[in-house]
Image (spheres, grey):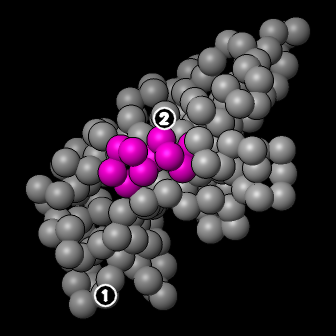
């Protein structure tokens, strides 16, 4: 069964729509309003072969991190029946994070004062691997949309949280 690409999953609360994700983030922040938070979106992908067909799973994670005191996260998965080249995978991951941000940020801003949190998009590229030549391009995509971009080793939202579910 292919997961619904519009539903998020919480490790503790199961499936939920985007409005419920916003409520959960708001409730988490309300539990300790004196703390500062980071809201992070990151995506990762994994290629595989199934019955001799190439397919790729993309996972986008939304994380609310209470600085120094834990976090909550939500993730959604999309499956494509093809195996794109590395450049196309990285672009797709970045675009999925941007699309999620376009959906979530306005709802988040209406529910929680932006003074309570920093917002970041984590991109699964870094200076040491085969993606090093793409850093400027994908960081430019994120910054061009008005968001802060983080890359490896600081992009744990993509390389750890989203990666956990690919």
* Residue nearer the viewer, 106 or 12: 106
Quarter placement of the C terminus:
top right
Say which quadrant the N terminus sits in.
top right
Q: Is residue 53 above or below residue 17?
A: above
On the question of residue 9 being in view, the answer is: no
At horizontal 61% and vertical 48% (from top left) the residue drawn is 136
Q: Residue furthest left?
A: 110
Front-lying residue, 113 or 94:
94
Mark 2 and mark 1: Cα distance apart in space: 29 Å
Can you give x and y, in whole percent of width and height, for residue 52 in the image? 88, 9
- What secondary structure characterizes most of the magenta part? helix
Name the residue rendered at 22%, 55% in the picture.
Answer: 108
Q: Is residue 84 above or below residue 65?
A: above
Asked which secondary structure carries label 2, the reply is helix
Left or right relative to 69: residue 152: right
The range drawn in magenta is: 138-147
> Which circle, 2 or 1, is nearer the viewer?
2
The residue carrying mark 1 is 35
The residue sitting at 83% across, 44% down in the picture is 130
Q: Is residue 7 above or below residue 35?
A: above
* Relative height, residue 40 to residue 105 (above, below): below
Q: Are marks 2 and 1 in contact (CB under 8 Å)?
A: no
Residue shown at 73% from the left, 20% from the top = 84
Q: Is residue 51 magenta?
A: no
Residue 155, percent from left and from top = 61, 61
Task: Locate residue 101 relative to residue 62 in the image: left or right.
Answer: left
| Quarter holding residue 56 | top right
Mark number for residue 96? Answer: 2
- What is the quadrant of residue 6 in the picture? top left
Viewer-closest of 75 and 84: 84
Lower sequence index among marks 2 and 1? 1
Residue 109 as seen in the image, left or right of residue 5: left
């Amino acid at each position: 069964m292919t997961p619904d690409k519009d539903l998020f999953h919480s490790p503790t609360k199961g499936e939920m729509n985007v409005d419920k994700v916003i409520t959960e983030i708001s409730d988490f922040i309300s539990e300790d309003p004196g703390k500062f938070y980071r809201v992070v979106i990151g995506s990762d992908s994994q290629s595989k072969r199934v019955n001799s067909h190439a397919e790729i799973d993309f996972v986008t994670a939304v994380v609310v991190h209470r600085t120094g005191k834990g976090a909550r996260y939500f993730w959604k998965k999309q499956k494509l029946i093809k195996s794109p080249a590395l450049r196309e995978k990285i672009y797709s991951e970045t675009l999925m994070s941007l699309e999620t941000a376009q959906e979530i940020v306005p709802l988040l801003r209406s529910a929680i004062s932006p003074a309570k949190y920093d917002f970041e998009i984590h991109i699964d590229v870094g200076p040491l691997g085969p993606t090093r030549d793409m850093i400027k391009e994908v960081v430019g995509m994120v910054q061009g949309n008005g968001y802060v971009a983080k890359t490896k080793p600081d992009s744990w939202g993509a390389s750890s949280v989203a990666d956990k579910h690919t």
